[in-house]
Image (cartoon, rainbow, N blue to C red):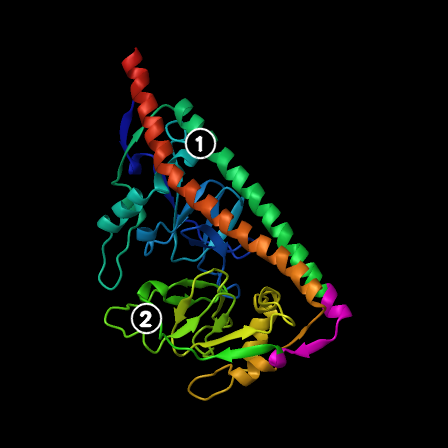
Amino acid sequence: MGLTKYKLGDLITQRREKYDGVSDLPIRGVSREGFIDAKQPDADTSLYNTFYLYDFVFNPARMEINSIALNIEFEKAICSSLYEIFFVSRPEIILPAYLNLFIKRDEFARQCEFIGWGSAREYCRVGDISDIDIELPSIEIQRKYVDIYNAMLANQKAYETGLEDLKLVCDGYIEDLRRRCPAEKIGKYIIQSDSRNEQGLTVDAVRGLAVSKEMITTKADMQGVSLNNYKIVPPAYIAYVPDTSRRGDKMSLGFNDTDETFLVSSISTVFSTKKDRLVPEYLMLFFCRAEFDRYARFHSWGSARETFDWEEMRDVKIPIPDIKVQEAISDIYKAYKERQAINERLKTRIKDLCPILIKGSLDEAEKEVAAV
């Protein structure tokens, strides 16, 4: 059969259905990773849009980062009125899942960025997407490559489920300790560090502190910035940002679980633990709990800015069992973090597979024609 070229607009139809306000429907937002929980669950939903199974939902102001998702989970749900929705109206020509492979490519995101328009913000709407060209193989070939993608996705999801089971084990241990072991202030087990960048570490060593409790590659513009006053974070040290007023209900905090030495901004607080009494990974288990974020926010003080200072950190109470118990729980936590990193790499590889699968399907269609 070979390849047939279409405009996307010939294959999709925009959905324009408002929420009736009667049915109790799930509310979802969209990111480049897919559907996410609504950031404002108590918002007025009277103007929200309704979408259905196999609908595509996207943020027209974020298409340059591929903020679009195919709904394969909900029979019916609602989303912000800022989002736009479309569905495949010619399923005999293109499978929604195959279109999803086409869309989840960096090349598609670049096309959306190029055709986006606007003043303060560039938008890429259904009408703009409709002008994009797409070459299609037969439905049989489409289905073959969709099946390959789905098989890999199923494997990743199974791995992710096991990952969450491991996290439940960690949480279970913590809850059991809270019932059995009296809580103590951590102040006598932690040591503040104020070492500055005397080693001459470069910008490659600079890390930001995320609300996800990770050290991440800095997003700040470091051009021309002196690193002399930056604080050193050796392996197994923890750093946090005392200013909690600009970070909503979560604290920016990170643990250096590598063998490298990092740098963080001078506004950060850096500390280590007395490892013979308090294992840093064990302490991080408590820092990663939503309960700690609520505690830190409540105990932050100030007028123009609220801060969770060093003395407040020292007053944090947690159960501190025998060091062998801490190490055992920390080993589970380490395994969880390692598998979490593997899972993120798996998700990246699956996304990177989309252009390969599209190319493979097009090549197969051309080979079929050549063989005739």
Mark 2 sits on what residue?
Answer: 200
| Mark 2 or mark 1, earlier in chain | 1
User: Which residue does the image show at 51% across and 72% down from the upper left?
Assistant: 249
- Amino acid marked by disc 1: Val
Is residue 101 in the magenta section?
no
Q: Is residue 27 above or below residue 133?
A: below
Q: Nearer the viewer, residue 152 or 326?
A: 326
Is residue 184 in the magenta section?
yes
User: Which residue does the image show at 56% across and 47% down from the upper left?
Assistant: 160
Q: Is residue 19 visible?
A: no
Q: Is residue 338 above or below residue 175?
A: above
User: Which residue does the image show at 45% across and 34% down from the upper left?
Assistant: 149
Single out the residue that lies furthest toward the right: 180
Rounded to the nearest angstrom, the CA distance separating label 2 from label 1 is 51 Å
Q: Is residue 25 left or right of residue 56?
A: right
Q: Is residue 123 visible?
A: yes
Single out the residue that lies furthest toward the front: 199
Location of residue 221 in the rendering, given as x and y in whole percent from the top left corner: 28, 68
Location of residue 40 in the rendering, given as x and y in whole percent from the top left corner: 49, 65
- Amino acid marked by disc 2: Gly
Q: Within 10 angstroms of label 2, few (less than 14), some, or many (20 or more) residues?
A: few
At mark 1, the secondary structure is: helix
Location of residue 55 in the rendering, given as x and y in whole percent from the top left corner: 44, 43
Report which quarter residue 220 is drawn in. Answer: bottom left
Q: Nearer the viewer, mark 2 or mark 1?
A: 2
Q: Nearer the viewer, residue 152 or 121?
A: 152
Over which residues does the magenta segment extend?
176-188
User: Quadrant location of the N terminus?
Assistant: top left
Location of residue 337 in the rendering, given as x and y in whole percent from the top left corner: 55, 55
Mark 1 sits on what residue?
Answer: 146
Q: Main secondary structure of the magenta part?
A: helix
